[in-house]
Amino acid sequence: MPGRQIVCDVSVIVKWVIKEDYSDYAERIRIDCLNGRITVVIPSIAIAEVADALRKYYLRGLISEDYLRRALNLLKDSLLNIYGITWESIISASELSIKYGISIYDANIRGLSHET
C-alpha cells in the first residue's frame, strides 16, 4: 500500500461530503489519500456508520436524497481500504487495545494491517 496508513474516524469521512467545522482538515486527508501520500483504512462497519450519519442529515432536511446517493458514491470511489471484521480479529484487537491503550477500531485495523 502506498504511503503511511491511517485509520479515519467516521466523523472525518463524513466531513469529506458534508461541510462542517474542520472539514478543511478532513479534505486534506482525502486529497492525500487520492494522491497516494497516505492510505486510509477503516473497519467494514464504518461504511454503515457513514451511511447512517448521512441519512440523519437527510432526515433533518439538510441534504437531499440525491445528494445522499451522490455522496455515498463519491465515498465509494475514495480509495478507502476496508477491512472485514471477524470474531477472531475482535479478540486480537481487544488484546492490542489493552496493550497499546487504543480503541478496538484502531486495534482491529492495526492487527489486520500487519497480516496483509
Image (tube, helix red, strand yellow):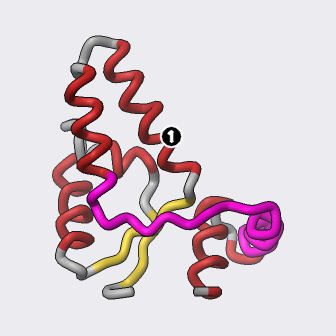
Where is residue 18? Give x, y as percent. Answer: 23, 37
Q: Quadrant of residue 17?
A: top left
Position of residue 14 relative to residue 28, above or below, is: above
Q: How many marks?
A: 1
Residue at point 58%, 49% (across, down): 45
Work out which quarter of the rendered image holds the N terminus and state it.
Answer: bottom left
Where is residue 84? Give x, y as percent. Answer: 62, 63
Residue at point 22%, 47% (across, down): 23
Residues drawn in magenta: 76-98
Numbered disc 1: secondary structure = helix
Work out which quarter of the rendered image holds the C terminus and state it.
Answer: bottom right
Give whichever of 28, 65 is nearer the camera.
65
Residue at point 42%, 72% (across, down): 6
Other-residue count near label 1 (Cα within 10 Å), few / some / many at <14 / 14–19 / ≥20: some
Q: Which residue is tagged 1?
A: 49
Say if residue 103 shows up in the picture: no
Q: Amino acid at mark 1?
A: Glu
Residue at point 81%, 69% (across, down): 88
Where is residue 24? Give x, y as percent. Answer: 16, 52
Position of residue 18 relative to residue 85, above or below, is: above
* Magenta highlight on residue 88: yes
Say if residue 21 shows up in the picture: yes
Position of residue 55 relative to residue 18, above or below, is: above
* Magenta highlight on residue 34: no
Give whichever of 19, 80 is nearer the camera.
80
Where is residue 10? Give x, y as percent. Answer: 44, 48
Q: Quadrant of residue 27?
A: bottom left
